[in-house]
Image (cartoon, rainbow, N blue to C red):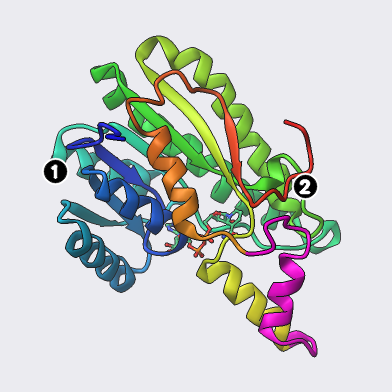
Amino acid sequence: MNLGLENRVAIVAASSRGLGKACALELAREGAQVVICARDTACLAATADEIASATGADVFPVEADLTGDAQIRTLVAETLARFGRIDVLVTNNGGPPAGFFDDFDDEAWLQAHQLTLLSAVRLIRATLPAMRARQWGRIINITSVSVKQPVDNLLLSNVYRPGVTGLAKTLSAQLAADGITVNNVAPGYTRTDRVLDLARARAADGDQTVESVLADTVANVPMGRLGEPGELAALVAFLASEQAAYITGATIQVDGGYVASLL
Ligand code: NAD
């Protein structure tokens, strides 16, 4: 299937590693020009080189901390200066810390609000004028299965990611007339540095091996394995495509069957 992404311009947030990087790679494979961003300059530059040499795409790395409004506006301005348009926005960020209610003070709640909800609000706000100008756009938010099935020790994710879902659903109705779709993808347990680092930390804290921590992690996943970042990225590329023009306001999980709800 030709997804019609040749020469589209895509910003993928938080994309030096993990899910964001996989999305940038997949969009580049489909012929898009891709803007990637993160705070870690060296890793960001290496990722840009890796994607460009694997795909031949024009990959533009912009250093940005997505907890700040000014840096997000600069990211969008630099994209427009370089490419003159923005067709696709994938919102994403580092994950909020794991923990339970007693673990978090006001500062932790405010930081999670900024990291998880406000960064999506700011990215969309900064990007919308360029999409409206061309009457075409695809906004795809990377959230989590926690929006469909709260995860015990991920309280901050359970609270703020549904906020992103509410934002997307509301905007999807309001932006449809401008040819802009807004959808969410909800990853389950996926093999990225974040998941492997958490497993290593849990193994170091207890008397388990990393392998047995990962086996516990996938015990409730019907597929019996972690997801691969490329499996989420394939859905993101489809939602960015011409063919996905009639899909909006949806949340689709990529979780090996983990979410137990009907819808
Ligand atoms: P990761 O740690 O592998 O990658 C995170 C990326 O975000 C990196 O490129 C990092 O440099 C960048 N980043 C972090 N903080 C940033 C900031 N303030 N400004 C700019 N860039 C920043 O994580 P991942 O596994 O790819 O997860 C991405 C998102 O998806 C997270 O919010 C995570 O909680 C969520 N998620 C992941 C999984 C999973 O299993 N991997 C499951 C559900 C949800």
Q: Secondary structure at mark 2?
A: loop
* Residue lying farthest to the right in this orientation: 102
Q: Position of residue 108 (x, y in %)?
A: 68, 57
CA distance separating discs 1 and 2: 40 Å
Q: Residue at x 69, y 48 (%)?
A: 257
**Disc 2 marks which residue?**
150
* Residue 30 falls left or right of residue 259: left
Q: Earlier in the sequence, mark 1 or mark 2?
A: 1
Which mark lies nearer to you, 1 or 2? 2
Count the labels in the image: 2
Q: Decide: is 95 above or below 79.
A: below
Q: Do residues under tags 1 and 2 come within 8 Å of each other at their CB atoms?
A: no
Q: Which residues are magenta?
A: 205-225
Q: Residue at x 25, y 61 (%)?
A: 51
| Residue 209 forms part of the magenta stretch | yes
Q: Amino acid at mark 2?
A: Pro
| Residue 29 forms part of the magenta stretch | no
Camera sees residue 65: no
* Image disc number at residue 134: none
Q: Position of residue 44 (x, y in %)?
A: 31, 65
* Image disc number at residue 82: 1
Q: Amino acid at mark 1?
A: Arg
Camera sees residue 103: yes
Mark 1 crowd level (few <14, some 14–19, many ≥20, 10 Å Cα) = few
